Amino acid sequence: MAPRVLVSDKLSTAAVDIFKRRGVEVDFRPDLGKDKEALATAIGDYDGLAIRSATKVTPKILERATRLKVIGRAGIGVDNVDVPAATARGVIVMNTPFGNSITTAEHAIALMFAVAREIPAADASTQAGKWEKNRFMGVEITAKTLGLIGCGNIGSIVADRAIGLKMHVAAYDPFLSAERAIELGVEKVELDELFARADFISLHVPMTDKTRNIVDAAAIAKMKKGVRIVNCARGGLVDEVALRAALDSGHVAGAGFDVFTEEPAEANPLFGHPAVVCTPHLGAATSEAQENVALQVAEQMSEYLIRGAVSNAINAPSITAEEAPRLKPFVALAERLGSFAGQLTDAGLKSVRIEYEGEVASMNAKALTSAAITGLLRPLLADVNMVSAPVIARERGVAIEEVRREEAETYESVIRLTVETDSFTRHVAGTVFADGKPRIIDIKGIEIEAAFAPSMLYVTNDDKPGYVGALGQTLGAAGVNIATFNLGRAAQGGEAIALVQIDGDIPAEVVAKVEALEHVTQARALRF
């Protein structure tokens, strides 16, 4: 059955056609974006939800979205999506971070010009029949220093445009490498130095706990008198009350704002000041940008629903369309190795080490690790998935370590999982054979080759004569049929392991009888 997508906001016909061409059934219902009850009623029939900013994806909506796999936001901000709630339900949330980058960067440059030359006020004055040529004395931007707070995708475009305007660009960005700064032609500086030197400051960072009010009263006090500030990124990055005070005192000469702490902004401390230019969140408001993000979200969602490719996800690792088929059997292996360890773990988890050896070491480790953690946590917490598992592990203080080795000793690819708890350390390893099926190859350092099956019995025992017969007799007397039987041992007479594939479920009382057999140290029913 073809996947179904609901489009609950306005997308172009070309974007809707992309879904159809890719084999996705699509219902275009932009009327649902502002009708929460109607959306909640309809959402249960869809695998994907494509939105802009009007649709609010709340926990209530997600509770009804029993089939939903992906939410695609045509735009950058996902403030209208409850991402933690979507993550908990295993719903991937995608955005389109590049479709409106140029448009937003151009708007920042436009506001900088408008503030520098007081264009809106001059326009209003002139159209009112005044000719106040001496009133509007602006400043040139040539040879001025532009301080960029954030030099990522949009910030780097602003830098390029500003350098073309013969400005000197200084950038503060903790993730900007020295090599990248040289490539962009910007000077990498610390934040206080940027405040002290910049003639213009433009913000291009996301809203986080660290960036909230990054420009506050203390920061403004460090700026040179006559600085002009532009914000086309996120409301709340600048303390608007503190900025208004600095504008009133003349310390800040002007400001251009496209975003505000509260939107829609019907009132704001900046409104009414003659040196302030405001626009109603127009950063992405060009026909080109709106079309670009619509096409991009349709492509991304289709790629995921048809081919399993994940791109620009807020809450999941990316998987390209090319690597998805190759990765799929190893995702299954990682998840089952985690499940094996999780079903045998009763004590509190402390850490997990996942080692990738051979060809698998060059694959997408984030996706594989997410699968392994999902398998590990699901027996303990039940309601987890590849999207939520890494978040849940971090919240519980479980340390996760990834190790890559290009060489594997015995197989082309090996995944090794080591789990440390308060009372023991457990180790299991596996591989994928040419048939694409995952297999266990090592448990606690004991070599054993076994395919995963829906119902299995795991037994550890002392390697003594008579044990195998007693096990078979116990299962047979209980009417439990053995499908396959795999054995391994550390050394003659030492610790041994049996993995038995069972037809159907094995009753708990039968497991208890097996565990009571002579030489048996542990017996556990497993399901995969």
Image (cartoon, rainbow, N blue to C red):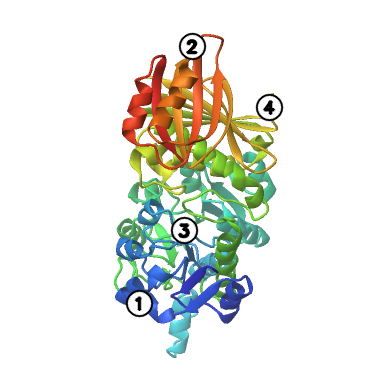
CA distance for labels 2 and 4: 33 Å
Q: CA distance from mark 1 to mark 3?
A: 20 Å
Q: Outermost residue, bottom direction?
A: 129
Judge depth for marks 4 and 3 and give the one in front. Answer: 4
Q: According to the image, label 3 marks what residue?
A: 93
- Mark 2 nearby-residue class (10 Å; few <14, some 14–19, many ≥20): some
Q: Residue under circle 2?
A: 464
Report how far apart the C-alphas of labels 1 and 4 lie in the structure: 55 Å
Check disc 4 and report its element: helix, strand or loop.
Answer: loop
Residue sitting at x 34%, y 41%: 381
Is residue 212 positioned above or below 441 on the image?
below
* Dot label at residue 34: 1
Residue in front for this viewpoint, 298 or 152: 298
The answer to which of marks 2 and 1 sits earlier in the sequence is: 1
The label nearer to you, 2 versus 1, is: 2
Q: CA distance from mark 2 to mark 1?
A: 70 Å
Distance Cα–Cα, label 4 vs label 3: 36 Å
Give the percent coordinates (x, y) of residue 128: 42, 89
Amino acid beneath label 2: Lys
